[in-house]
Amino acid sequence: MLMLAAALAACTAGCGPGSSGDDASGGHGAPGHDEVDVSVLPSKPSKPMTVQQLATGLGCEPELGGKYADYRLAWCDVNGTRVVLTDFDTAEGQRLWLEHSKDYGGVYLVGERWLVTGNSLKEISPLQDKFGGKIEKGDIHGPPPPASARPADK
């Protein structure tokens, strides 16, 4: 579990506000262009891939973060945006990792024993056509939206 926490901390280091150049995001999962309910987005078939295969498909050189209990992490810069690539030895390991990582926010493209993590739906949704998978969102993190963007209290 300690290795999981360390890996999650490393993952979120590349996914903070401003790392994508999109200052309007306000942090992981903040309101804005990501207000789409991802549960209604279709899932697309995917196949198992490694972080190296994902990086090749993205056209970037991965910065390998290491091999942990049953997964590998890497980072890639794609069109000025940093994404985190993760592959898993087992589907169970992926499910557990994803359950815990969603507490840190972000948007995830979840494939068969791999995932790509970014800051926004705008960054991640185009990758679904390339790799397949299902888009999922983490919890909202970052500053609250401006008062003008909040729903009125009743």
Image (cartoon, rainbow, N blue to C red):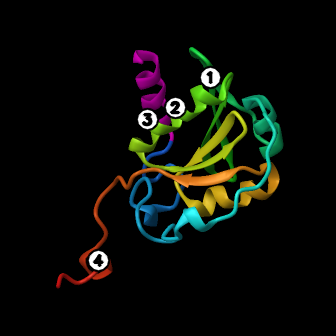
Secondary element at image label 3: helix
Q: Earlier in the sequence, mark 2 or mark 1?
A: 1
Q: Earlier in the sequence, mark 3 or mark 4?
A: 3
Residue at position x 66%, y 24% in the image: 90
Question: Mark 4 = which residue?
Answer: 150
What's the CA distance linking mark 3 and mark 1? Answer: 14 Å
Question: Mark 1 = which residue?
Answer: 71
Q: Earlier in the sequence, mark 1 or mark 4?
A: 1
45, above or below 143, in the image: above
What's the CA distance linking mark 2 and mark 4? Answer: 32 Å
In the picture, the disc for residue 100 is 3
Q: Earlier in the sequence, mark 3 or mark 1?
A: 1
Residue at position x 52%, y 68% in the image: 37
Density class for disc 3 (Cα within 10 Å; few <14, some 14-19, many ≥20) is: few
Front in this rendered view, residue 152 or 77: 152
Inspect the image, locate mark 3, and give the three-letter code of the amino acid beneath it.
His
Front in this rendered view, residue 40 or 103: 40
| Highlighted range, magenta | 1-14
Percent across and percent down for residue 13 are 45, 36
Proximity of marks 2 and 4: CB atoms separated by less than 8 Å: no
Proximity of marks 2 and 3: CB atoms separated by less than 8 Å: yes
What's the CA distance linking mark 2 and mark 1? Answer: 9 Å
What's the CA distance linking mark 1 and mark 4? Answer: 39 Å
Inspect the image, locate mark 1, and give the three-letter code of the amino acid beneath it.
Tyr
Question: Mark 2 = which residue?
Answer: 97
Front in this rendered view, residue 34 or 22: 34
In magenta stretch: residue 147: no
Secondary element at image label 1: strand
Density class for disc 4 (Cα within 10 Å; few <14, some 14-19, many ≥20) is: few
